[in-house]
Image: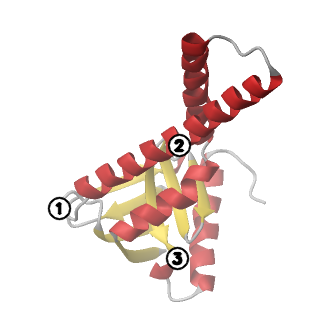
Amino acid sequence: MRVTTNIRKTDLIRFNVAILPTLRSTYVTVLVISLFIFGLICWKNGIPQTQSGWIGILLSSFGGGFFGMLFGVVFSMISILLMSSSKNGILGQHEYSLSPEGLHEKTPANEGLSRWSGITKVRVAGPYLLFQISGCLFHIVPARSFRSDESFNEFVSLSIEHWQKAQNRQVK
């Protein structure tokens, strides 16, 4: 089964917005930043002695953790958008095909095969089919690349079936 898609900068933004709330690393980062801020406030002002002091420091810490993560995401997205182009194969036309061997990708810049056993996860997030190659490396296939929802769902089902077979998992 084969699909040709055109990845745009808006796809990268939408993909990140769809995937970030589902990643464990998002919450770990918020927690680490919050703990750092908590420690910094305690070091500077001392340990709170009242209930309202504790509430204030905890709210400040988690608020700082959330906004620190948000700042990191915005900075990361700006960097990704500035570095992405069709010349390096991130944006532009992508041709994906499925085989029992793996996911084949072909762009004007490169061509490759990701074997099913090397793909860590296959799932749908928002309007995208995601092939997670490693922690932060994904191949994305927008649902808009298909003529119908049925053909998108068929591509998703076949992808998951191949991936589960390679992972020695039972198909549901």
The image's colour scheme reads secondary structure
Residue assigned mark 2: 67
- Residue depicted at 61% across the width and 84% down the height: 149
Mark closer to the chain start, 3 or 2:
2
**Measured Cα–Cα span from mark 3 to mark 1:** 24 Å
Crowding near the residue tagged with mark 2, few <14, some 14–19, many ≥20 C-alpha atoms within 10 Å: some
Q: Observer-nearest residue: 13 or 124?
A: 13
Residue 116's x, y, as percent?
52, 50
Say if residue 98 shows up in the picture.
no
Question: Mark 2 or mark 1: which is in front?
Answer: 2
**Residue 125, x across and y down, in percent:** 60, 62
Q: Is residue 144 visible?
A: yes
Q: Nearer the viewer, residue 138 or 100?
A: 138
Q: Tell me whether circle 2 and circle 1 mark residues in contact (CB < 8 Å).
A: no
Q: Whole-percent x and y of residue 132?
A: 51, 50
Alpha carbon of mark 2 to alpha carbon of mark 1: how far?
Answer: 34 Å
Identity, as a three-letter code, of the amino acid under mark 1? Lys
User: Left of 71 or right of it: where is 82?
Assistant: left
Q: Which residue is mark 1?
A: 87
Q: Residue at x 49, y 83 (%)?
A: 146
What amino acid is at disc 2? Phe
Instruction: Answer whether labels 3 and 1 touch (C-beta < 8 Å).
Output: no
Query: According to the image, label 3 marks what residue?
Result: 143
Quadrant of residue 124 within the rendered picture = bottom right
Query: Which residue: 52% across, 76% down?
Result: 143
